[in-house]
Image (tube, rainbow, N blue to C red):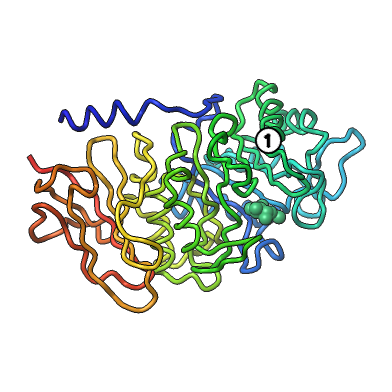
Amino acid sequence: MLFVVVFATIFTTSRGYDNGSGSALPIMGWNSWCTDDYCGLLDLCFEEEIHEIADAMVSSGMVEKGYRLLELDDCWSDTKRDANNNLQADPARFPSGIPALVEYVESRGLILGLYTSAGDKTCKYNRPGSQGFFDVDARWFAANGVKLVKADNCGVSGGEQEVFTNFSHYLNATGVPIIFSTCEWGNAEVWKWGASIAQMFRINQDHLPFWTFNLTNGGQGSKEIIEVMSNPDIGGSTVRFGYADPDFLMTGISSMTQTESETEFALWAMFGGPMIVATDVRNMSDWKKSVLLNTDIIAVSQDALVQPGRRVKGAANGPQVWAKRLDNGDQAVAFYNAGDVDTIDISVSWDEIGFPAGCNVTARDLWAHSPVSGSLVGGGVAKNVLPHGNKMWRVTLAN
Ligand code: GLA
């Protein structure tokens, strides 16, 4: 018990910037980006489709499980500002306008998030960016009931800390609590200052809908992003109200298999960042539901202690063990096989996750939703972890 108290004291002291927008836990939701395979070309972003998504988030059980954000990415706005210099919705896509959309999604228990860029244009199709209009746009978002603003980096030519701090200032000056989501791709070591101005801050290039992909400038697969997460400076930068953001979950999109999507979901939950799904959630397959609606793993993501998980064992291409401290003194442990070929067993000693050496524990398998059997004195072995796959346990110290 003393152990629990000591950890709770040491690790709950740092906090991010609570602007009253309800970000005490990592936000969960849905975003329109990459809802096709090509990210931006045919994404779901017409009024009728968005209504269907909101409805599906309710009927599938997503809203009940905590997915409460519905966010439109670089797709919703017109290519020109209106006569008063305000942003406006693309009339062909959203003929009823943004306030009506807010009303619709809020009637379904969701909040609406919208995208802009902190530069002079957005990243696709040169829609207007917010540069030079931070005050105008902040007031427009606030007046229209938008509860999250994602600010991209296209058209920003350096000086990100100052630019995004400035935008944050204008959003907060509206007096309306709005979640600020920065998307400056991890430039300017955002993990050192992001949590002081934003409720979530992107730490990396775009997550492309692939397991592995390493485009130096432009995109990464799940595997490469997990490596970014393993950097202790970046991983450790999440605090309550300020979450390091590894980008969207690409569950089942493009070539992402069930095994890979499970690992992505498990590691994102361990990392403790936002859990925002970019996939069509209408008519989800059973396996997609089994991933996105996994209550045991969602509980790890949404744990009240808000401790980022960390890699405690292993390296880039091999077996790895990740651990995350939880509010009741338990730890979540993910056994991850980053290899491409062999199915392997992965072991851990409890002292490697910070429990006393030689201790006994009980464990629950968070994918099988059942107790882990066999001896767990001193450590545990996750059997038959598939290539790109994971096992995830919740480990409780035995009395
Ligand atoms: C950038 C961002 C993505 C997405 C697109 C939209 O690439 O990093 O998350 O918003 O722009 O064009």
Q: Position of residue 345 (x, y in %)?
A: 22, 69
Q: Secondary structure at mark 1?
A: helix
Q: Is residue 104 left or right of residue 41?
A: left
Work out whether residue 234 or residue 183 is closer to the camera in this orientation and state it: 234
**Considering only vertical position in the picture, is 106 above or below 212?**
above
**Badge 1 amino acid:** Phe
**Which residue is pictured at 39% across the width and 75% down the height?**
340
Q: Position of residue 236 (x, y in %)?
A: 42, 41
Work out whether residue 206 or residue 289 is closer to the camera in this orientation and state it: 206
Q: Is residue 61 left or right of residue 352?
A: right
Q: Quadrant of residue 399?
A: top left
Work out whether residue 229 or residue 120 is closer to the camera in this orientation and state it: 229
Q: Quadrant of residue 282?
A: bottom right
The N terminus appears in which quarter of the rendering?
A: top left
Q: Quadrant of ligand 1?
A: bottom right
**Residue at the disc numbered 1:** 164
